[in-house]
Image: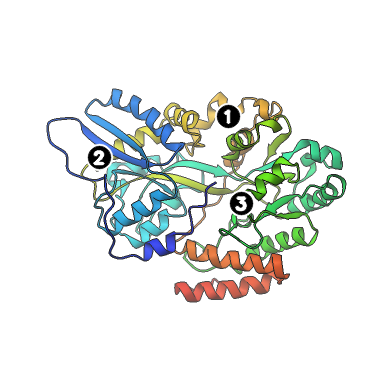
């Protein structure tokens, strides 16, 4: 996915900014109410498709979906919130890595949807998501739209040449052993990582290992957990892979795509979005790829993890909050509607009831006839823990990335590197280190 995390720390530090244009302005009375929506492609295509149906069912409301773009949308939302809501759209598409910062830094900037009845949908979404849209005050500041469980996409042909059976891989340690055979017999690396973090921090794989253990950079109380046993275990696994020579360096523009094209990456530890992205990226590799849930970090541990999600929120300053909420409730809480958005915009639904659709168990020719979406619905049925990003996620991401680079390029001890990183993160954020 496009990296949209780095600008958050700088953006949220702003206190006086120019308002974004084209959003929350009064409307003339007498005609239909127009609700504006900010999103990005292709997700905006899904929203636009269901907006037409919504308008037919609600003739007094028009919906104007605008593809603002990613990452441009984060600057526009941040500027609008800093300006007290001036210029914001009524409905805002927000990633989980930004939502906590907006809730913390701009009280009242997003509408508390409890006032509009959102609480009745509390149990409708994948486990682990509702806590992420709930503020410290108990307010509900968005409804979940997209969920991306972790996956393990692998080249079936390469595993066969290496004599390795993915079905027998239950832990990442077992995956490492398979990786050694892959490297020896096919020349392919197990995974790729941007080792020097050139052009941006590459922490998605590390974070997924944390999330499989129910851990992250912060706990629910806001304490720093970057040096916790799960954090050290995750980084130790990455070092073990690197030391075994089975991690490719994917720094540099298009490095990963080139390795994938040449058959030098056997596994892509990507999330559900890759079910559509891999066929688009490499159509000529049809039939070679398969997907399963990722191995567990420890024997008997969880294989499920929600690596990211996106949500729809209502601007607190919007004079059309009721109409805006009516639209997002329509779009996100009805299985048929949210699945239409999925078909048109590729957004994997967070709504649990949506997964009963036959599309989620349908065979996909690109993946050799495998029902490629099923591993992800199975993971969500297993249940994933909530991830607490906090308003300091961008800072944590940078510090954790620096620690990973030390481990990968300088051979640093994972525990020592993470202890140093956790101390620095606590100092920079005025947070406590978790005991």
Question: CA separation, marks 2 and 1?
Answer: 33 Å
Image location (x, y in percent) of residue 201: 57, 59
Question: CA separation, marks 2 and 3?
Answer: 45 Å
**Residue shown at 48% from the left, 32% from the top:** 342
Above/below status of 413 relative to 171: below
Badge 1 crowding class, 10 Å Cα cut-off, few under 14, some 14 to 19, many 20 or more, is some
Residue 333 in view, yes or no: no
Residue 206 in view, yes or no: yes
Image location (x, y in percent) of residue 214: 59, 56
Q: Quadrant of residue 161?
A: top right
**Residue shown at 41% from the left, 30% from the top:** 334
Q: Name the residue tied to disc 2.
A: 322
Nearer the camera: disc 2 or disc 3: 3
Q: Earlier in the sequence, mark 2 or mark 3?
A: 3
Instruction: Classify residue 87 as left or right of residue 200.
Output: left
**Residue shown at 27% from the left, 37% from the top:** 35
Q: Earlier in the sequence, mark 1 or mark 3?
A: 3
Instruction: Classify residue 416 as left or right of residue 38.
Output: right
Q: Which mark is residue 360?
A: 1
Quadrant where the C terminus sits is bottom right
Image location (x, y in percent) of residue 322: 25, 40
**Nearer the observer, 247 or 429:** 247
Q: Quadrant of residue 44?
A: top left
Above/below status of 256 relative to 272: below
Instruction: Classify residue 232 as left or right of residue 353.
Output: right
Q: Are marks 2 and 3 in contact (CB under 8 Å)?
A: no
Q: Are marks 2 and 1 in contact (CB under 8 Å)?
A: no
Tag 2 secondary structure: helix
Q: Residue furthest front?
A: 253
Q: Name the residue tied to disc 3.
A: 253
Tag 3 secondary structure: loop
């Amino acid at each position: 996915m496009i990296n949209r995390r780095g600008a958050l720390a700088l953006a949220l530090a702003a206190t006086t900014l120019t308002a974004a244009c084209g959003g929350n302005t009064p409307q003339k009375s007498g005609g239909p109410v127009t609700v504006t929506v900010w999103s990005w492609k292709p997700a905006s295509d899904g929203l636009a498709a269901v907006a037409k149906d919504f308008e037919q069912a609600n003739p007094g409301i028009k919906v104007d979906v605008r593809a603002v773009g990613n990452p441009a949308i984060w600057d526009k939302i941040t500027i609008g919130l800093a300006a007290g809501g001036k210029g914001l759209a009524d409905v805002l598409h927000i990633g989980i890595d930004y939502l906590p910062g907006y809730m913390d830094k701009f009280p009242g900037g997003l509408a508390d949807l409890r006032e509009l009845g959102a609480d009745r949908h509390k149990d409708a979404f994948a486990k682990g998501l509702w806590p992420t849209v709930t503020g410290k005050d108990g307010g509900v500041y968005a409804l979940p739209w997209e969920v991306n469980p972790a996956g393990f996409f692998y080249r079936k042909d390469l595993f066969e040449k290496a004599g390795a059976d993915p079905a027998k891989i239950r832990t990442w340690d077992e995956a490492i052993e398979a990786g050694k055979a892959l490297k020896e017999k096919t020349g392919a690396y197990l995974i790729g990582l941007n080792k020097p973090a050139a052009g941006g921090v590459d922490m998605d794989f590390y974070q997924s290992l944390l999330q499989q253990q129910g851990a992250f950079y912060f706990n629910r109380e806001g304490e720093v957990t970057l040096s916790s046993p799960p954090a050290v275990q995750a980084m130790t696994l990455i070092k073990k892979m690197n030391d075994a020579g089975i991690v490719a360096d994917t720094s540099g523009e298009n490095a990963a795509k080139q390795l994938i094209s040449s058959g030098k990456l056997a596994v892509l530890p990507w999330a559900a979005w890759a079910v559509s992205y891999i066929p688009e990226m490499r159509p000529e590799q049809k039939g070679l790829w398969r997907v399963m849930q990722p191995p567990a970090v420890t024997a008997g541990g969880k294989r499920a993890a929600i690596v990211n999600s996106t949500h729809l929120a209502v601007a607190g300053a919007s004079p059309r909050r009721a109409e805006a909420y009516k639209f997002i409730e329509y779009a996100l809480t009805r299985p048929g509607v949210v699945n239409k958005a999925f078909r048109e915009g590729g957004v994997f639904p967070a709504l649990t009831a949506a997964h009963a659709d036959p599309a989620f168990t349908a065979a996909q020719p690109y993946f050799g006839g495998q029902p490629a979406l099923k591993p992800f619905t199975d993971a969500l049925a297993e249940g994933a823990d909530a991830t607490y990003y906090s308003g300091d996620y961008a800072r944590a991401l940078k510090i954790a990335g620096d620690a990973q680079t030390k481990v990968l390029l300088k051979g640093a001890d994972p525990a020592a590197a993470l202890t140093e990183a956790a101390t620095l993160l606590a100092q920079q954020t005025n947070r406590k280190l978790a005991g």
